[in-house]
Amino acid sequence: MIVIHIIEALGGGVYSYFKDLTLHFSKENDIKTIIFYSKNRKEIDPKNLELITCHNVELVEVDMCRKLNPLQDYKSILKLRKLLKKYNPDIVHLHSSKASVLGRIAASNVVPKYSVFYTPHGYSFLSKEFSNSKKKVFYFIEKYIQKIFGGTTLACGDTEYEIAQKIGKSMLVRNGIFVDKISSFKKSVSNSKLTIGILARITTARNPELFNAIALRFPKYNFIWIGDGDLKSQLTAPNITVTGWSLDQVEVMSRLNSIDVYLQTSLWEGLPIALLEAMALEKPLVATNIIGNKDIIVHNENGYLFNSIDELDIQFKKLEDERTRNEMGKNGLKRCKTLFNTTTNFNQMKSIYLNAISNAKQ
């Protein structure tokens, strides 16, 4: 079985998703995984690409751009179409909004509609970086590109699935992590001050302005941003430490394990991998009450959701208690193993692929 994944934005959480996907499917000798990707995003590190190149996995660069560019988009579609004819895949899986549009058009009359799948990883029309008029346009595109060119949406989270069902044919395959592998990095932590952190690129979506405001509101706590990004200058509070990026998983997980509470300040999400990793390390979670975050956190069970910064006064106070943190952490680990286990979820994806191929032969 040849499976081609098309992705324009191979960075951040989507990169983590693909690193796990290639590791999982490289062990499947009956599956050849080919990734069509673009290097145009500045967050894409060539060294990262080396980490997803393994047995039965091939990377093919295709020039794609994020913004609407009719001439470049047309060239991208022609290139994708030529490559799809060359590789003759059994399955085409599109990731994120731009790849969905380009890939579906390119696959038209080349790959059967029932062999085309799409994972939004957070619909573009939910992004708060766009105006309401743009969001309406993006929703229209999502709805009618599927209606015209077909395919099945494989939503990565429960709320994304609810939305996908209103747009067209869809199924739920949750994002996940290798829970046992991440859990192996857990060690006991003893901080002199409550330490609150996040693992993310410092971008508009992750809302560093809010993270900074929270740090200023709670000067008695330590805050850590594990990562780097263009908006680093917004993190000005004296009790914030910005670590920068590391490609070494041991180092990253060690930093994540060092915190007491995981704080996600996102404006929008698909289903954030870093939250799942924090759960596997038995960290209580505190996050904005948005799609993605609320699919992971059960309020008062494995963490807290908040709508305004004022709510954190009570939430952080409760989390000063180590017993509360430990109880929420154990609840989170249990939930992670049940719902967000990569091995289980990718096996589900493989079954969907095989079922599509089987139906094609009938």
Image: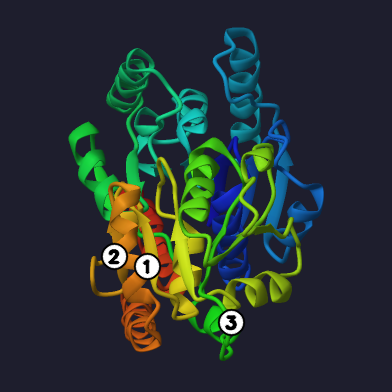
Q: Position of residue 351 (x, y in %)?
A: 36, 64
Q: Is residue 280 above or below residue 245?
A: below
In this rendering, does residue 329 appear at all? yes
CA gap, disc 2 to disc 3?
A: 20 Å
Q: Nearer the viewer, residue 96 or 296?
A: 296
The one of 209 and 182 positioned closer to us in this rendering: 209
Side of 1 where 286 appears, left or right: left
Indicate left or right for 159 with 83 as reference: left
Which amino acid, by three-letter code, is at mark 1?
Phe
Q: Which mark is residue 314?
A: 2
Q: Are marks 2 and 1 in contact (CB under 8 Å)?
A: yes
Question: In percent of the image, x 45 and y 67: which residue is there?
Answer: 276
> Within 10 Å of the Cα at label 3, are there few (<14), some (14-19), or many (20+) other Cα atoms?
few
**x 42%, y 60%: residue:** 175
Q: Position of residue 326 (x, y in %)?
A: 38, 86
Against 119, is 65 above or below? above
Say whether disc 2 or disc 3 marks the residue closer to the N-terminus. 3
Give whichever of 273, 294 is nearer the camera. Answer: 294
Residue pictured at 31% horizontal, 76% vertical:
335
Query: Can residue 362 be seen from the camera position used here?
Result: no
Query: Which is more N-terminal, label 1 or label 3?
Result: 3
Residue 212, position in %: x, y?
Answer: 54, 47
**Image mark for residue 316:** 1
Q: Read off the residue under disc 3.
A: 192
Disc 1, SS:
helix
What is the spatial separation of the Cα atoms under label 3 and label 1, in whole angstroms?
16 Å
Q: Amino acid at mark 3?
A: Ser
Specify the amino acid type for callout 2. Answer: Ile
Q: Colour scheme of this structure image?
A: rainbow
Residue lying at 66% horizontally and 36% vertically, measured from the top left: 86
Where is 325 relative to 91, above or below? below
User: In 3D space, how far apart are the residues under numbered discs 2 and 1 (Cα atoms)?
Assistant: 6 Å
